[in-house]
Each structure stands twice: as structure tokens, then as C-alpha cells.
Image (cartoon, rainbow, N blue to C red):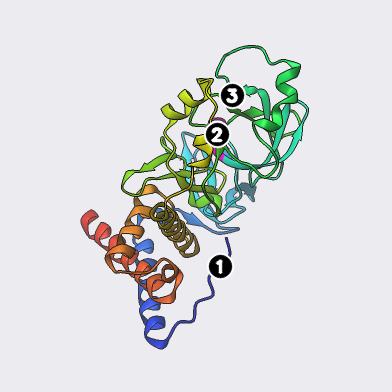
């Protein structure tokens, strides 16, 4: 995601600075700020015995010190530092979005914004006919009819291989090839692990997939039940392929939602379906054009709105 180069006037600079000061003061008043540490800060452990030093900590002269910037977390006797900004660290069960970079024998290799490429085996996904059976040599020859280079795919992390690369699986109709949309790249730490990463925004007829690896997909809604019936049907789909143009209104919605995600990413706010829809609705309410959502005025308004929201939360806690 490229950073925005905004040309703010004097009034907008003053408003933006006031909103940033408000956000900083609200952050300093929360309990999480008291547990924040920087490199070489001492972590108080109250001289407890059998303390386990986890990630981001070290022992120096009998004291536990932090080796990176973040928030101190405790799990029983384990003390570690959770970095506020970090690269994607995959876990089993993560929903990720990737791009095919190679079609190899019995597998596809995907770029997933990780230090190594991910592998999707032919045996780890549903076949186009939808029948559960052993993969044959014919299936291997027809791999390019399923995915080719530069295709965007949604899958789930199944495990890790011996060389450290990821093993993916796509054994559900909600996984597979993604079409008719935009692929966005955001910092992975802005996408928190949640129970649901697939979102259907009904009012916009758009699907939103927040990949844990920092790849976000915004595209036209695809009905998984219709997709399954199409795969199982033997009728030719030539007419369907000719009538698959995306409506203009849906394209506008995709672009508006994508710009909302870009704006939240540049500001550094956590991405969720609530924050994205709120930003989109605010742009519609204020009659902001799609191309103006990345402008200076709406940028300042978004920061001010976030500062007001956090200030109200702080007042409620008190």
C-alpha cells in the first residue's frame, strides 16, 4: 500500500494536530499504556520465582528487560512482549489471500506476504467436479484449468512443512479463486484474528475478505451455493461466461470500499468490517466522491472522527 502524499492547508494541519494530540492523550490514559515498553526497559515481575521469559524479553543483571517495543503480556508465569508492529506470523487456521506464482507438479506456489512461499497441494482442495476421489494423472494435467499464474486465491493455513513454508488447504466452497474485484495490501498487524474473516456487505453486493497475512480482497458477491451447483452441473457455461459483467454500481461500491481500506491503512487504524463500513457510510453521507476519499479533507475528518470515538469510550470507562 503506497502512502498518501497529502497537501494540507494551514487549517487542516491545525485540525489534524489537534486530533492526533487527542488520540495520544487518550492512549496514555488507558491501562495498556502502563504496560507499554521500549527496548531496554525493565519489566516488573515483583521478584516472582520461576518466571518464564518469552519472546521479546531477556535477562540482564537479574532483571527482565524488553528487547523490542510493544506491550507486556502475561500468561501464568510466562512474560513476553507483543510487538505493536510486526511481520505476518502464520498460525494454523489462518484465513489468507494469496497470488499464484508457479504451477508445479501436484501443487501451486503462492505469494502470501510471508518470508517464504506457501504451497497448495492438488490433494488439499476440491476438484471442479466436486467429487471426493483420489487425484489421478489426468487431474494433474488439468491443473492449469483450475489455477494459473497471477490468479488470486483464498485458502486456509493447514500446517508447516519441514523447510518452514506453509501448507494450505481449500476444501470448502468459500475458498478458491477470487475474481471481479481488487486485491489490496495492508500491514498485517492491522488485521486482527477474528472468528469471521469473510464478510458479505449486502447493501453494496460486495464480498470483503480480510486476510490475516495483510492481503485484503474486495470483490463482487459470489453465492457459494450457486457456485457449488455450477460446479456439479454438466451443462455448458458459455452463456454464463458472456453475461458475467460486473454492474457499474457494484464497481463503484468496490472502489469506494477499497479506498476506505486504503485510508484506514494509511492512518494506521485496525481494519474490521465495522470500521470499513463506517468509513464508507460517512463518505456517502458527506457526499464525498470516490476519488476524493483519499484527499486531505476526508483524511482529516476520519482522524477527527476516530479521536471523538476514543474520547467517548474513555469517558464511558470513567
Q: Nearer the viewer, mark 1 or mark 2?
A: 2
- Judging by the rendered image, the residue that carries numbered circle 3 is 128
156 displayed left or right of 140: left
Image: magenta residue range: 92-96
Query: Are there few (<14), some (14-19), or many (20+) residues within 10 Å of tag 3?
Result: few
Single out the residue that lies furthest toward the bottom.
Answer: 10
Expressed as whole percent of the image width and height from the top left, the position of residue 146 reads 64, 31
Mark 2 vs mark 3: which is more N-terminal? 3
Q: Are marks 1 and 2 in contact (CB under 8 Å)?
A: no
Tell me residue 91's x, y (percent).
57, 34
Mark 3 → mark 1, Cα distance in angstroms: 40 Å
What is the secondary structure assignment of the residue under circle 3?
loop
Residue 123 against residue 250 in the figure, above or below = above
Q: Residue at x 58, y 65 (%)?
A: 2
Dot 3 or dot 1: first in sequence order is: 1
State whether residue 46 appears in this view. Answer: no
Label 1 environment density (alpha carbons within 10 Å; few <14, some 14–19, many ≥20): few
The circle on residue 238 is 2
Secondary structure of residue under mark 1: loop
- Sequence-wise, the earlier of marks 1 and 2 is 1
Where residue 206 sits: x, y (%)? 40, 46
Q: Nearer the viewer, residue 190 or 9?
A: 9
Residue drawn at the location 49% of the way across and 36% of the way down: 240
Mark 3 vs mark 1: give the one in front. 3
Outermost residue to the front: 239
In this view, the residue in front, 315 or 207, is 207
| Residue 106, position as x, y percentages in the image | 74, 25
Numbered circle sitting on residue 3:
1
Q: Nearer the viewer, mark 2 or mark 3?
A: 2
Tally of numbered discs: 3
- Which residue is at the far top? 133
Question: Element at badge 2?
Answer: helix
Amino acid at each position: 500500500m503506497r502512502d498518501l502524499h497529502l497537501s494540507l492547508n494551514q487549517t487542516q494541519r491545525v485540525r489534524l494536530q489537534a486530533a492526533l494530540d487527542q488520540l495520544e492523550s487518550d492512549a496514555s490514559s488507558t491501562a495498556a499504556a502502563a504496560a507499554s515498553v521500549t527496548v531496554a526497559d525493565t519489566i516488573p515481575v515483583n521478584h516472582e520465582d520461576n518466571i518464564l521469559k518469552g519472546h521479546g524479553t531477556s535477562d540482564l543483571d537479574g532483571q527482565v528487560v524488553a528487547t523490542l517495543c510493544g506491550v507486556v503480556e502475561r500468561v501464568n508465569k510466562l512474560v513476553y512482549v507483543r510487538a505493536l508492529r510486526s511481520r505476518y506470523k502464520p498460525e494454523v487456521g489462518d484465513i489468507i489471500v494469496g497470488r499464484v506464482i508457479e504451477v508445479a507438479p501436484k501443487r501451486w506456489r503462492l505469494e502470501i506476504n510471508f518470508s517464504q512461499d506457501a504451497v497448495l497441494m492438488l490433494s488439499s482442495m476440491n476438484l471442479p467436479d466436486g467429487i471426493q476421489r483420489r487425484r489421478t494423472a489426468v487431474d494433474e494435467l488439468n491443473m492449469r484449468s483450475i489455477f494459473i499464474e497471477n490468479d488470486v486465491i483464498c485458502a486456509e493455513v493447514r500446517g508447516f512443512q519441514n523447510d518452514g513454508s506453509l501448507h494450505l488447504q481449500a476444501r470448502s466452497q468459500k475458498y478458491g479463486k477470487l475474481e471481479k474485484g481488487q486485491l489490496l495490501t495492508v500491514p498485517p498487524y492491522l488485521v486482527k484474528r477474528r472468528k469471521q474473516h469473510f464478510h458479505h456487505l449486502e447493501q453494496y453486493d460486495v464480498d470483503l475478505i480480510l486476510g490475516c497475512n495483510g492481503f485484503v480482497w474486495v470483490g463482487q458477491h459470489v453465492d457459494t451455493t450457486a457456485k457449488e451447483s455450477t460446479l456439479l452441473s454438466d451443462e455448458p457455461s458459455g452463456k454464463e461466461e458472456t453475461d458475467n459483467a460486473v454492474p457499474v454500481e457494484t464497481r463503484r461500491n468496490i472502489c469506494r470500499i477499497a479506498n476506505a481500506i486504503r485510508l484506514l491503512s494509511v492512518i494506521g487504524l485496525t481494519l474490521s468490517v465495522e470500521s470499513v463500513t463506517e468509513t464508507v457510510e460517512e463518505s456517502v453521507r458527506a457526499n464525498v466522491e470516490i476519488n476524493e476519499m483519499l484527499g486531505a479533507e476526508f483524511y482529516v475528518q476520519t482522524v477527527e472522527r476516530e479521536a471523538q470515538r476514543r474520547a467517548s469510550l474513555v469517558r464511558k470507562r470513567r
